[in-house]
C-alpha cells in the first residue's frame, strides 16, 4: 500500500515539475515579440500565429504541471483518507479541462491574429510598391548609362570625379546627400563613381524590405545590370563587392 502511494506521489511530482519547466520556458521563448514590422508580410503573420498558438499550448502545459504538483503533494493524504477514486477523477478532469483550455486559447489566438481583408490589401500594396521601386531603379540605371555614354561622346572620356559628375545635366536633378557621394532617387540610393577611363554605379534600397529588396550594379562595360537580394540597406549598409558570388545577371 505504501509502495503504491509513494510511487503515485513521485509520478505526479516528477511529471508536474517537467510540465511546469517545459511549459514555462517554452511559453516565454516561443511567444512572438509584441513589435511587428512596419509592413508585415503574409509569411510573418503565418509564423506569428503559429508561435502564438504553440506558446498558448505550452502555457496550459505549465498550468497543468502546477496542478499535478499539487495533486502529487496531497496524494498521500488523499490515499490515507481512502479516497483513491478522487485522485483518478482529478487526473481525468484535469486532462479534459486542459484539452478544452488548449483548444479554446488556440482558436481565440487564431481569430485575434488572423489576416483580415485590410491586412491582405496592405501586404499586396507593399509588394506592389517594392516591385515598382525596383523597376524604377533599373530604369534609372539605364538612364545613367546613357548619360555617361553621351558625356563620353562629347568629351571623349568619362567624368574624372564626383564633382564633375555633379555638372552633368542628368545629375543636377538628383543632388548628393550631404557629405556623401550617394544620391536618393525614389526609394533607392545610388552611388555613382567615375575616374575618366571608367565609371560604375551601385543602387540599393533605402530601407530593405520596405522600399525594395534587390540591389543593382552597372558600369561602363555594358548596359547589362547585375543584381542581388543581399540585405543592403540605407547609408550605413551600402551595396558593394560587385565581383562577389552573390551578384548575378
Image (cartoon, rainbow, N blue to C red):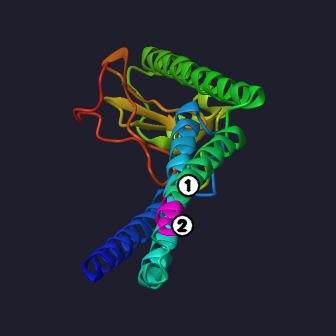
Q: Please name whichever residue, 59 or 177, is drawn nearer the observer in this view of the structure.
A: 59
In the rendered structure, the answer to whether residue 198 lies left or right of residue 26 reads left
Q: Residue at x 44, y 43 (%)?
A: 232
- Callout 2: SS: helix
Query: Could you tell which of marks 1 and 2 lies nearer the N-terminus?
Result: 2
Secondary structure at badge 1 equals: helix
Residue 98, label in figure: 1
Q: Residue at x 55, y 51 (%)?
A: 96
Is residue 234 among the parts visible in the rendering? no
Based on the picture, tell me whether residue 165 belongs to the magenta stretch. Answer: no
* Mark 2 Cα-neighbour bin, 10 Å: few <14, some 14–19, many ≥20: some
Q: Name the residue rendered at 44%, 14% in the picture.
A: 153
Residue closest to the eye, 95 or 186: 95
Q: Is residue 13 visible?
A: yes
The reply, left or right, for residue 232 in relation to residue 120 is left
From the viewer's perspective, is residue 124 above or below residue 88? above
Residue linked to disc 2: 63
Q: Nearer the viewer, residue 54 or 181?
A: 54
- Quadrant, the N terminus: bottom left
Quadrant in which the C terminus is drawn = top left
Left or right of residue 213: residue 196: left
Instruction: For label 1, count other residues whose C-alpha is less than 10 Å away and answer few (under 14), some (14-19) or many (20+).
Output: some
**Which residue is the extreme one toward the front?**
82
Q: Position of residue 14 (x, y in %)?
A: 33, 74
Nearest the viewer among 242 and 55 is 55
Q: Are marks 1 and 2 in contact (CB under 8 Å)?
A: yes
The x, y position of residue 162, in whole percent, is: 48, 42
Provide the residue span drawn in magenta: 85-91
Residue 86 falls within the magenta-colored stretch:
yes
User: For residue 22, what is the image quadrant?
Assistant: bottom left
Amino acid at each position: 500500500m505504501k509502495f503504491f502511494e509513494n510511487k503515485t506521489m513521485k509520478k505526479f511530482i516528477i511529471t508536474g515539475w517537467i510540465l511546469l519547466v517545459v511549459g514555462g520556458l517554452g511559453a516565454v521563448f516561443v511567444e512572438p515579440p509584441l513589435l511587428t514590422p512596419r509592413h508585415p508580410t503574409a509569411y510573418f503573420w503565418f509564423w506569428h500565429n503559429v508561435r502564438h498558438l504553440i506558446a498558448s499550448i505550452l502555457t496550459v502545459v505549465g498550468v497543468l504541471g502546477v496542478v499535478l504538483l499539487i495533486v502529487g503533494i496531497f496524494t498521500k493524504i488523499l490515499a490515507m483518507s481512502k479516497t483513491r477514486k478522487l485522485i483518478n477523477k482529478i487526473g481525468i478532469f484535469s486532462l479534459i479541462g486542459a484539452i478544452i483550455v488548449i483548444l479554446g486559447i488556440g482558436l481565440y489566438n487564431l481569430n485575434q491574429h488572423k489576416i483580415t481583408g485590410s491586412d491582405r490589401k496592405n501586404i499586396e500594396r507593399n509588394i506592389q510598391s517594392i516591385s515598382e521601386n525596383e523597376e524604377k531603379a533599373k530604369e534609372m540605371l539605364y538612364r545613367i548609362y546613357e548619360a555617361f555614354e553621351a558625356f563620353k561622346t562629347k568629351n571623349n572620356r568619362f567624368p574624372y570625379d564626383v564633382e564633375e559628375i555633379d555638372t552633368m545635366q542628368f545629375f543636377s536633378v538628383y543632388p548628393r546627400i550631404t557629405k556623401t557621394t550617394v544620391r536618393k532617387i525614389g526609394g533607392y540610393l545610388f552611388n555613382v563613381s567615375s575616374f575618366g577611363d571608367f565609371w560604375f554605379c551601385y543602387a540599393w534600397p533605402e530601407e530593405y524590405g520596405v522600399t525594395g529588396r534587390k540591389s543593382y550594379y552597372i558600369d561602363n562595360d555594358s548596359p547589362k545590370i547585375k543584381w542581388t537580394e543581399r540585405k543592403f540597406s540605407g547609408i550605413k549598409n551600402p551595396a558593394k563587392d560587385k565581383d562577389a558570388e552573390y551578384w548575378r545577371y
